């Protein structure tokens, strides 16, 4: 349960809970006990290098109780106020705050079964009628569309009661692994219905009431308490513009908190301190009134036990990533080129007469280009290019699927335990991994647990033998006999007959899949990118087991989930280390680099992004803008299509976008060939996957990427977990990097220069030039500047 504090301005503390005399007595007894224990006194600040993660005395489960109090995040893109911060650090202990005569004691949690002051109980009900339903969850803007399980009543209805602050919320029911498409047919109690953007309708609940001060802090959520860069990071979220100052009071010292990030409807305050066990609470100054914020009246102090339950994989934050689509990267062994043709999906598919084709490296693309036009790229070719990748500063390679499959892309796996001969042999793979590791490059492979290909032996056995097959329960067969490729006869991924869906509730299937993942980690891979994890029928159960078993044998294995949206529920320490952060790259950085977002709007969206994830998760971020599944970034920026000459303005904006990606926390990931300035429109036969024409590589753009790699290597602050906002103005965004706010990154997406004030002191240009500035800075058009404190 999220721990939420709400303090209405219309009422004093004395009417929040009980009568005046009782509360006064409780307050004096409580404060006396706190002073006696030294909780408000100065504590020692002993150094510690032990990693840890929070654990409170609260008993919190993954399901939502009847008084859940998660915050609603606004999805608007309205502008925010320009704010200037000049503080250099928040890590030093501060003097003990002295409560003034008008201080208030308030609590993050209230008595069991009731909503905190300012929130209202709201009941959601799903009635399936005569349908048999096994599992229903509530998802909406109040929980970032994550999963809150509903409870089945004896009369067959599914019910969940939650606490919501006044506001308007969109939501849907998620029934047995499927979204309710039209909520107007599922929940007649909703206040209204709105288009969901996918041809269906969301329900809307309007919660009335007066506006209140809302503070969020859940010590079990890494967004609020995490271990990042071997520091304990404690944060709380609050309405914007209300808190003037805040102090984290602990049994190991008191720490000044800084306003870290903000957006249109909230802001986050942050402090960092040594790792170790401690008790803590907050002291806030709000409009001249001091608030002492405790856990509860029964158990005032929050507690962190110093145990790290979600360790940060430290090498990720300093790495630069590079995605390789093997068939289209480089051909290093021509002898295996034709080996793709004899087991292609089209050979098995009984509903088509098409056949796969093998093309020369520079042949024109055909309608089969996406999936069945082969060009011969392989593992040996990647090995040949390792020195080139190393020169870019690459320290991680993400490989698209290389295991036996029936397509160019490899997402229709036939055998999870065998390297596809069209890409090479296990010997060649072992050599590649060895040579990559010699250069300090780690490698992660693509894993596809939701579905197989129709050429998988298990599926072919079902096709031949029907219910007599030992693999009948590995899939979801609707009728038999059937023709291979007929998606109406069995469940396929998104209805595709070439991708029969695996029954991951079957223990045999889970063992087969997880066993294959462990085999390749044992073989020498450093992590796993997981394809479409949300589509599994039992995603939550599967990936909890998956993580547990992987981390037991390979604790430093990097686990990345292909989730395209802002979805913090996947990175709480029980599933993935990071998501594929399209929500950062495509939803924020790309439109900003295009010039379609103002600086204030971009900073607003970045605030919503960074409040959602723990700082340890941010540091492990797999940050990308494009991939094999999207148009190339230079095309998205207006550079043209495959075969065009890239427009200079688009190249300039690509340099801005890539510089932003390299200066934000986490790992920047480049799709193969973007550094060369290649073009490709996904909507034209997936031309973004066309073979890299190395002789046409833009050398000056490659040098730009090399310079970014050297920049990250030379400034450790750019590999730190911390980001703090500075300001936004016109097309400018500016933010600090490093634990002492020692680096200031300033970007401008406008076609004209913009002048901004600088924090006090001298600021020296670290990239791309070598200027020195005081008081103000004129930011050139479509540019990014990295400044270092003088």
Image: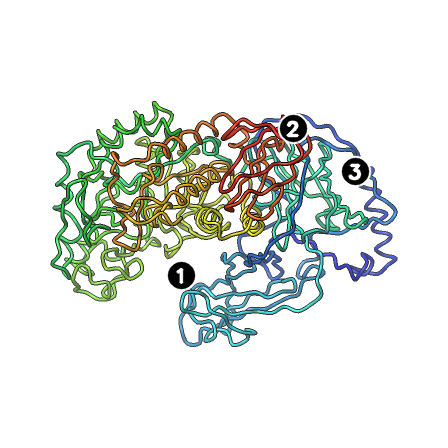
Spatial CA distance of label 1 from label 2 is 56 Å
Instruction: Kindly state the secondary structure of the residue where label 2 is placed.
Output: strand
- First-in-chain label (1 vs 3): 3
In the rendered image, the quadrant that contains the C terminus is top right
- Res 90 seen here: no
10 Å crowding of disc 2: few (<14), some (14-19), many (20+): some
280 horizontally vs 475: left or right? right
Q: Pointer 1: what residue?
A: 177
**Residue at left offset 51%, top offset 30%:** 767
User: In x, y percent, where is residue 310?
Assistant: 52, 39
- Res 135 seen here: yes
Up the image or down, 525 lies above or below 571; here it is above
- First-in-chain label (1 vs 2): 1
User: In x, y percent, where is residue 348?
Assistant: 14, 54
User: In x, y percent, where is residue 62?
Assistant: 53, 52
In this rendered view, identify the residue nearer to me: 691 or 438.
691
Instruction: Kindly state the secondary structure of the residue where label 3 is placed.
Output: loop
Q: Are marks 2 and 3 in contact (CB under 8 Å)?
A: no
In this rendered view, identify the residue nearer to me: 321 or 686.
686
Residue 161, by quadrant, is bottom right
In this rendered view, identify the residue nearer to me: 537 or 74.
74
**Residue at left offset 73%, top offset 40%:** 247
């Amino acid at each position: 349960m999220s721990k939420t504090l709400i303090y209405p301005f219309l009422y004093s503390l004395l009417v929040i809970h009980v009568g005046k005399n009782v509360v006064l007595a409780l307050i004096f007894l409580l404060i006396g006990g706190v002073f006696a224990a030294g909780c408000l006194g100065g504590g020692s600040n002993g150094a510690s290098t032990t990693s840890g993660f929070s654990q409170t005395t609260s008993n919190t489960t993954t399901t939502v109780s009847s008084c859940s109090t998660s915050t609603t995040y606004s999805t608007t893109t309205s502008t925010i106020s320009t704010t200037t911060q000049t503080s250099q650090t928040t890590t030093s202990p501060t003097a003990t705050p002295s409560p003034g005569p008008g201080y208030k004691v308030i609590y993050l949690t209230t008595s069991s079964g009731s909503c905190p002051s300012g929130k209202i109980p709201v009941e959601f009900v799903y009635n399936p009628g005569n349908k048999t339903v096994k599992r229903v969850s509530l998802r909406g803007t109040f929980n970032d569309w994550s999963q809150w399980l509903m409870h089945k009543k004896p009369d067959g209805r599914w019910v969940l009661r939650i606490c919501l602050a006044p506001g308007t919320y969109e939501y849907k029911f998620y029934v047995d692994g499927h979204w309710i498409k039209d909520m107007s047919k599922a929940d007649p109690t909703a206040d209204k219905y709105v288009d969901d953007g996918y041809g269906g309708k969301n329900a809307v609940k309007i919660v009335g009431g007066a506006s209140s001060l809302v503070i969020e802090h859940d010590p079990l959520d890494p967004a609020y308490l995490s271990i990042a860069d071997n520091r304990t990071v404690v944060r709380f979220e609050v309405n914007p513009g209300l808190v003037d100052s805040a102090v984290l009071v602990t049994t190991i010292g008191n720490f000044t908190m800084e306003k870290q990030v903000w957006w249109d409807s909230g802001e986050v305050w942050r402090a960092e301190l040594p790792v170790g066990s401690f008790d803590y609470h907050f002291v806030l100054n709000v409009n001249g009134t001091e608030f002492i914020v405790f856990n509860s009246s029964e158990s005032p102090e929050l507690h962190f036990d110093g145990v790290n339950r979600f360790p940060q994989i430290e090498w990720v934050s300093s790495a630069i990533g590079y995605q390789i689509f093997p068939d289209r990267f480089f051909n290093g062994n021509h002898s295996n080129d034709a080996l793709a043709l004899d087991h292609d999906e089209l050979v098995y598919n009984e509903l088509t007469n098409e056949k796969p084709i093998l093309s020369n490296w520079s042949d024109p693309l055909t309608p089969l280009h996406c999936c069945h036009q082969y060009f011969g790229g392989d593992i040996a070719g990647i090995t040949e290019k390792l020195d080139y990748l190393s020169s870019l500063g690459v320290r991680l390679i993400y490989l698209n699927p290389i295991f036996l499959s029936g397509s160019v892309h490899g997402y229709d796996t036939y055998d999870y335990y065998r390297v596809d001969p069209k890409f090479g042999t296990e010997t060649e793979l072992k050599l590649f991994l060895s040579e990559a590791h010699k250069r300090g490059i780690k490698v992660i492979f693509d894993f596809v647990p939701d579905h197989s290909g129709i050429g998988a032996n298990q599926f072919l056995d079902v096709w031949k033998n029907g219910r007599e097959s030992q693999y009948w329960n590995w899939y979801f067969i609707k009728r038999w006999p059937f023709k291979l490729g007929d998606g109406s006869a069995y469940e396929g991924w998104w209805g595709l007959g070439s991708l029969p869906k695996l029954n991951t509730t079957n223990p045999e299937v889970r063992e087969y899949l997880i066993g294959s993942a462990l085999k390749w980690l044992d073989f020498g891979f450093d992590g796993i990118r997981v394809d479409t994890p949300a589509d599994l029928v039992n995603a939550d159960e599967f990936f909890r087991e998956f993580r547990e078993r992987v981390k037991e044998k390979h604790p430093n294995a990097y686990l990345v989930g292909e989730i395209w949206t802002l979805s913090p529920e996947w990175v709480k320490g029980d599933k993935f280390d990071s998501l594929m952060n399209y929500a950062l790259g495509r939803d924020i950085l790309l439109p900003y680099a295009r010039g379609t977002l103002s600086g204030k709007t971009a900073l607003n969206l970045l605030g919503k992004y960074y409040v959602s994830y723990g700082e340890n998760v941010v540091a492990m971020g797999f940050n990308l803008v494009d991939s094999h599944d999207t148009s190339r970034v230079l095309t998205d920026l207006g550079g043209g299509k495959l075969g065009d000459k890239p427009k200079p303005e688009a190249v300039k904006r690509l340099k801005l976008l890539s510089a932003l990606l390299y200066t934000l926390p986490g790992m920047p990931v480049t799709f193969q060939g973007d550094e060369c300035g290649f073009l490709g429109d996904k909507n034209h036969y997936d031309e973004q996957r066309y073979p890299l024409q190395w002789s046409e590589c833009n050398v000056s753009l490659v040098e730009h990427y090399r310079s970014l790699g050297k920049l990250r290597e030379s400034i450790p602050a750019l590999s730190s977990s911390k980001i703090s906002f500075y300001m936004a103005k016109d097309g400018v965004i500016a933010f600090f990097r490093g634990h002492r706010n020692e680096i200031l990154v300033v970007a401008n997406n406008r076609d004209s220069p913009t002048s901004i004030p600088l924090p006090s002191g001298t600021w020296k240009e670290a990239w791309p030039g070598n200027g020195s500035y005081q008081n103000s800075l004129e930011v050139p058009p479509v540019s990014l500047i990295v400044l270092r404190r003088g």
